[in-house]
Image (tube, grey):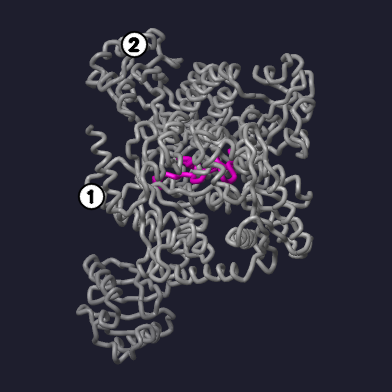
Amino acid sequence: MERSQSQSAAERAFERIAEAYVALGADWRCTYANAAACAFLGRRAGELLGRHIWTELPEDASRPLREACERAMAAQRPRTVEIRLQPLGRWFESRVHPAPDGLTISFQDIDERRRGEERLRAQQRLMEQAQRLARVGSWSWEVAANRVAWSDELYRIYGVDPARHTATFEAYLERVHPDDRARVRDTIERALREGGTFEFEERIRRPDGDERALYSRGMVETDAEGRAVRMQGICQDVTERKREERMAAGVHEILCGIAAQRPLAESLARIARLHEEQNPGALCSLLLLDADGRHVLHGAAPSLPETYSRAIHGMEIGEGHGSCGTAAWRIERVVVGDIASHPYWADYRELALAHGLRACWSTPVLGSHGEVLGTFAVYYREPREPRPAELADIDRMLPVASIAIESERLLGRLRERNRFFEMAQEVFCILDPRRGRLVQFNAFLQHLTGCSADELRERNYREFLLPLPGKESASSILGPTGFGASARESITRCVARDGSESLLEWTAFATPDGLLYAVAHDITARRIAEQKLQHAASHDAITDLPRRQQLEQALAELLRDGGAPVWLLVVGLDRFQVVNESVGHLIGDDVLRRVAGRLRAALGVQWQIARISGDRFAMAAGGLGRQAALELAERLRSVVARPIEGQDYRLLLTASVGISHSPEHGDTPATLLRSGVAAMLQAKRDGRDRVGEFSAAEKRALEERVLLGSRLRDAVRRDELELYYQPQYSALDHALTGFEALLRWNCGELGRVMPARFIPVAEALGLMPEIGGWVFAQAARQLREWLDRGHRGFTLAVNASAQQLQHPRLVEQVTAALQRHGVPPAMLEIEMTESALMENVSRVRSTLTGLKTLGVHLALDDFGTGYSSLAYLKQFPIDKLKIDQSFVRELPDNVSDGAIAQIIIELAHQLHMLVAAEGVETPAQAAFLAGLGCDELQGNGLGAAVPAIEAVRSFVAARGASSA
């Protein structure tokens, strides 16, 4: 009864306890659970009594609790264990109290404490990570007790083991470098006396001998009486930063010396010393490769014995020739950790060991183009292998050494080049545009001006370097230019002391100091030749009248106004071919000159006149009526009809005159010319020696051209096009060099139509890209067929129109044709006319560059009849010039044509181009052109254009000629 009362009293007491409480018997079954435990376990007391407590807890919580109970019972000692109840998401602390007949377990909620501890540990981990990343350690010193606490990172910085190191102020001072120890002690003692913050830099020595540079900063805490009680702070490892600063400063000093053109030996010695300062114990040597690339020469070795450096001077490079000789030979780093045993040093071992050298690592110094300039070697007086940091330091010095060596070589070449500048036939000078003075110049400027060097320095260069007439002033041509701007090109006159002038073509660029560096070429002779060639290209060689192209340009200007009608008169001499046949071409040319003079004299100033073909002249003007045009036409017919007298001849000629005008007969130069020629031809058909106006019949003829265009659209689809092949021969020995592919049209309705009729129509209709694509494909196919038959050593020329050159996919079109048939690009030659090049010059230049890159040859056809400008010839990658047949036709009798042909040939050869002549009809023409230096000949006199099946005979004939 007393026991029951006592037990009830105990249970009532347990019920008042706030924490959960259960009692277990010796069989581990629950004998009691208070209300807090029932709430904690989510059971009523009656449900818990007699049950194993483990069954009421999750597995991950019941296992550690049961192990704690078993150990407590076995040892009869209390146990504490922390468990996490996953359903509640909270941590609990369980205290187990054993007794001989059972045990009691209490559960206390410690979730807030546990979370706080975890946050504290996380913060501690973050702080340690941050310190490790920043290489910053922290410390605290209890001054009175001399207790020092270091963070883990600080132990790592000092390189000591926390288990073996006693952290005291004295132990810290032992690690400080002897040269810094007194200063550090004074700084700390002053901080203890004065309080506040402090900072200093120091060097420490780790137990392994490694030296580190540190930056320390801290503060002092004091008590109420102002006595220092605690000092705490941070310490950062700044070794690498200090090392980088010293390295950067050293490299900067070396580069400044190179820029100041100090001797190479001095720069190399500075490089060696800098590496030695960064790597104590290293002995550096820089060797240079000689001119033949077979021997090394002494460059600098400030710490090596001089006798050793002299001994290896001139050593031959090669496999096994020491570290340096092998590195230069292999073009790779060679590391020898022990000279005494390494086979590379077999021939040099005694020399090195006698001077106390035991290890050598050598790295080749490479130039900007990958060539070996020399070697960078590091010796040590004990056997050892390099650490990665040491190799990285060597790699940092290699570019500096390369710059030093290449700069010296460049300066040497510049000094040699300056000597050549003195002999050059070009002007090299430095100008000061602010003062208008010449700072420096070579002797050729004195030759051009006839002035002495002193006179040129004293004069303002703008007094004798003058702009071209109508151009910008000389002050702007050779005036200040913003630094960084691209090079400027200009042309000036150079007026000599005697008043003579030269033309100079300048290229100049500005430097940061405001000076102009300029080069000038004397282009006087070139300009004269160019002007002659331009005049020859734009003017008829016999009559000196403008050519057809110039008349078309004048017509275009007149038509552009769109106001008054533009009148065109075409004068055609009647039966002029009889003159050439009866009295010869020389007299015929004289007759043409006299007729041209009469026509020019009969015209007013408003008229433009040109010779548009052999015996045809055309005149154009605007702002007059029909009657005035008819009267002028009659006057022109009359002046031609007057007797023409020359030396040893007297002739009577007549002329037929055709008239057309805008807008009825055309609103473009081409249509007006076509209409005027048609009217002149009709006047000839009507009996000659008369004036005819463009009529409805001629208009119908133009309509017929429209019909021609409509049929041409389907020519490719209907397989009506065909290629003929005209052979081309060497002018020297008439060996076959290739063919020109000439297009023919076999129209089902119109019959055979020559290119002269349908090509202009095709271009007008925009059909040339399609037709040109067919031509390229057919030409490539024919090349493949001839190659498969064993024919070699020839090219095939294909014409490209202006419209094709403007097409953005021409290069792709040619590439596809060549690749489809497996034809080498060098066997294809693309011909184009001068006028075709001048339509959208930038696009054509890009297209030709693409073709040239592909490997195709480029030829300029009909040269001499278009623009013929040296200025544009040099802009295009042309391989060959083809002299137009109009200059060949009257050779060798026509002196003017011969002169033009000679100029073209000499010009082309100067520009490294081949020259071919078209329209060769006679052996005399062929011999004359060969004598001028022409490279290739083509014409009906040598071989007419024939179908492919007949062109094969040219190969047979060529083989026969070579075998003979």
Specify whether residue 836 is painted magenta.
no
In the displayed structure, does residue 422 sit left or right of residue 313?
Answer: right
Q: Quadrant of residue 497?
A: top right
Which residue is more in the foreground, 580 or 622? 580
Task: Please tell me whether residue 75 is drawn above or below residue 158 in the rendered image.
Answer: below
| Residue range (magenta) | 854-883
| Crowding at mark 1 (Cα within 10 Å: few <14, some 14-19, many 20+) | few
| Crowding at mark 2 (Cα within 10 Å: few <14, some 14-19, many 20+) | few
At 29% from the left edge and 44% from the top edge, which residue is drawn?
954
In the displayed structure, does residue 412 sit left or right of residue 695?
Answer: left
Task: Please tell me whether residue 368 is drawn above or below residue 773 in the rendered image.
Answer: above
Q: Quadrant of the N terminus?
A: bottom left
**Three-letter amino acid code at disc 2?**
His
What is the x, y in percent for residue 408?
51, 21
In the displayed structure, does residue 63 sit left or right of residue 645?
Answer: left
The answer to whether residue 871 shows anywhere in this view is: no
At 27% from the left edge and 72% from the top edge, which residue is drawn?
98
Rounded to the nearest angstrom, the CA distance separating label 1 from label 2 is 73 Å
Q: Quadrant of residue 7?
A: bottom left
At 67% from the left edge and 64% from the top edge, which residue is drawn?
693
Q: Give the mark nearer the N terminus: 1 vs 2.
A: 2
Residue under numbered circle 2: 355
Q: Classify mark 1: helix, strand or loop.
A: helix
At 31% from the left edge and 22% from the top edge, which residue is drawn?
323
Q: Indicate which label's residue lies in the foreground, 1 or 2.
A: 1
Task: Please tell me whether residue 177 is drawn above or below residue 216 in the rendered image.
Answer: above
Q: Quadrant of the C terminus?
A: top left
In the displayed structure, does residue 336 sit left or right of residue 599?
Answer: left
**Three-letter amino acid code at disc 1?**
Asp
Residue under numbered circle 1: 788
What is the x, y in percent for residue 800?
46, 53
